[in-house]
Image (cartoon, coloured by chain):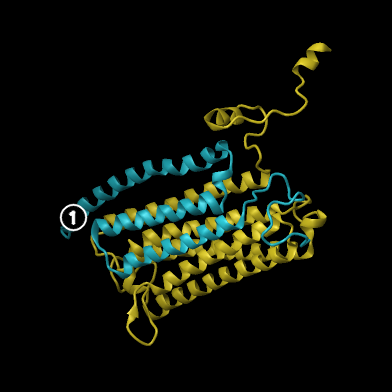
Amino acid sequence: MTQAEATNTGEALAPPDGLGGVVADWSSDQRAFKKVPWGKAMMWIFLLSDTFIFSIFLLSYMTVRMSTTVPWPYPSEIFALSFGGEPIPLILIAIMTFILITSSGTMVLAVNYGYRSDRVRTMIYLVITALFGATFVGMQAFEWTKLIVEEGVRPWTNPFGAPQFGSVFFMITGFHGFHVSVGVLFLFIIARKVWRGDFDTGKRGFFTSRKGNYQTVEIMGLYWHFVDLVWVFIFAFFYLW
Amino acid sequence: MANTEPHAEATADAPPEGQQHPLGIYIKIWALLFVLSTCSYLVDYLQFQGYLRWSLIILFMLLKAGLIVAVFMHMMWERLALLYAILIPPILVMVFLFLMTHEADNTFSLRGIFFGAGP
């Protein structure tokens, strides 16, 4: 009995920090990701796999652009818009970038108010985020329509230069736009759950039958910021380069 | 329910594992992201070319990506075990990048020889 008392510290010891903490966490014979709910760890691993998908898209774009002997189309002029006067280069894409960053900011506010259990503000900011996302998808639809109908861009040909431009453009922005659309859908679903008070009452979800809480808003936020993150890379490599 | 002030600090009824930080840091990073986006747009608007253009694009891109992952996605407050598990694999993609630049260079020179259109 005295031995048990000697080893019983009464409370769990704090896990070590730094590199020692990495080794301790991974070798702890328990869950590796401590202080992280399982849903969040799984979302991060999903985002890692999504990172690979977009990396492969961007790498294949780099490969076709480097290996073509035909000049690459100049995005600055293709995506220019004129508001009555001189065409402003790349202005449509710049506005889309600002819209997506704004939506990331409102998402952060939603997560923050969620952890304060401020149900109404969380719901409002989630809906605002979703509306910004829908605006982004709308502008992308406008961009696609302009390129397909007015300019005659196809996945196999375009009037500007290297034919690979079309296939790369439709694949990368299309896949990103699909991610944004799915994000908008889920933002509305989470906003409805918050509005109904599911996370305050611990109501069980229809799909997993688990009790939800405001961590769900943060996990939704991870996905939404990732969509913004991918756009940062697409904007840099596809539109600016 | 809304029983706390909008700008109050962490409340006791929040889940213990949640990421809760003062609003100020988010607002500052948000503003910084706007500034950086404007900068990367100006790279195109001011028609910088060559290595200056490419290095500025990469710089602003990495700063924006870093800020989003570190602050908005809370990575700077997570334990290192998660941070390394998520952030090291994408860095390994650089090996793939290295391979494909050489592959593309090779294809380009072959097309130059056979199509006779190379520089």
Residue drawn at (52%, 70%) of the image:
A136
- For the residue marked with disc 1, what is the amino acid? Gly
**Crowding near the residue tagged with mark 1, few <14, some 14–19, many ≥20 C-alpha atoms within 10 Å:** some
> Which residue occupies 61% across, 57% down?
B23
Q: Position of residue A24 (x, y in %)?
A: 60, 27
Residue A219: x and y, percent?
A: 64, 52
Report which quarter residue A10 is drawn in. top right
Q: Can residue A62 be seen in this view?
A: yes
Considering every residue shown, the one lying at the far top of the view is A2
* Residue marked by disc 1: B112
| Residue A88, image quadrant | bottom left
Question: Relative to A79, is A126 on the left or the right?
Answer: right
Return the residue nearer the eye: A57 or B83. Answer: B83
In the rendered image of this protein, which colour is used for chain A?
yellow
Residue at 81 percent across and 53 percent down: it is: A202
Q: Which chain is cyan?
A: B
Q: Position of residue A30 (x, y in %)?
A: 68, 30
For the N terminus of chain A, give its image quadrant.
Answer: top right
* Residue A131 in picture, x, y percent from top left: 60, 71
- Left or right of A165 in this view: A216: right
- The answer to whether A35 appears left or right of A199 in the picture is left
Q: Is residue A176 above or below residue B81?
A: below
Q: Can residue A167 be seen?
A: no
| Quarter of the figure with the C terminus of chain A | bottom left
